[in-house]
Image: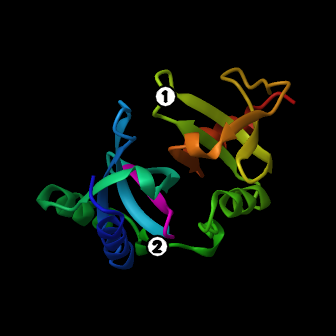
Amino acid sequence: MKGKQEILTKIREHCSNNLYARISRIGKANSKFSEVSRGYILDYSNDFLLFREEEDFLFTGLNIIPIKYVKAIRYNANDKYCDHINKSEYDIKEFQLVDSIKIDLTSWESIFESLMNSKKIVISECEKLKHGYFAIGDIKKFNEKFVFINHFDAEGNRDKELVKHKYNWITKITFDDNYSKVFSKYIKE
């Protein structure tokens, strides 16, 4: 894994130049967790980045990714061509941070406060555990170690209890994606 300063330099370069990024994410040495995310870095802090995910030239939502899981950021000839296609297909605003998605990336607490105040439906994931860990719903509360999500299942039913996710389990937060925006309209209350 590259050093944090080298990763932060690449994040800064990609963010300030609106460059397409292929981000390799990996867990700790003993973890089998390994993922690739493609898209654009919209904002960052020392510990988190805000990412507009792209798949097959469609933007699929926004992610908040802890930088500690970023192994590498690539921008090779293939990525440059994807960047060219995306910028030919979409308005420049798609590659920039706008006020409607302003998230305080200082800490998990500030992130969840921003998301809760904007009434975002979120998907909280831990991709590094053997069977994964997933919750989708609105944020009800948070503290210095946990976020509590009012989870709904694949039939639109809310769990009776809030789902508690420990911050150090979370590998990715997704919001403003089509799945959660559409599905949340059909939750059974």
State the residue at coordinates (63%, 74%).
99
Residue 106 picture location, percent across and down: 61, 68
Q: Which mark is residue 141?
A: none
Residue that carries the numbered disc 1 in the rendered image: 129
Q: Is residue 94 visible?
A: no
Label 1: how many residues lie within 10 Å, few (<14), some (14-19) or many (20+)? few
Q: Is residue 68 magenta-colored?
A: no
As helix, strand or loop, the secondary structure at mark 1 comes to loop
Tag count in the figure? 2
State the residue at coordinates (70%, 20%).
155
As helix, strand or loop, the secondary structure at mark 2 comes to loop
Quadrant location of the C terminus in the rendered image:
top right
Residue found at the very far front of the displayed protein? 29
Residue 86 picture location, percent across and down: 31, 61
Q: Is residue 50 magenta-colored?
A: yes
Q: Main secondary structure of the magenta part?
A: strand
- Res. 179 image quadrant: top right
Type of the residue with mark 1:
Leu
Q: CA distance from mark 2 to mark 1?
A: 33 Å
Residue that carries the numbered disc 2 in the rendered image: 96
Region in magenta: 45-54
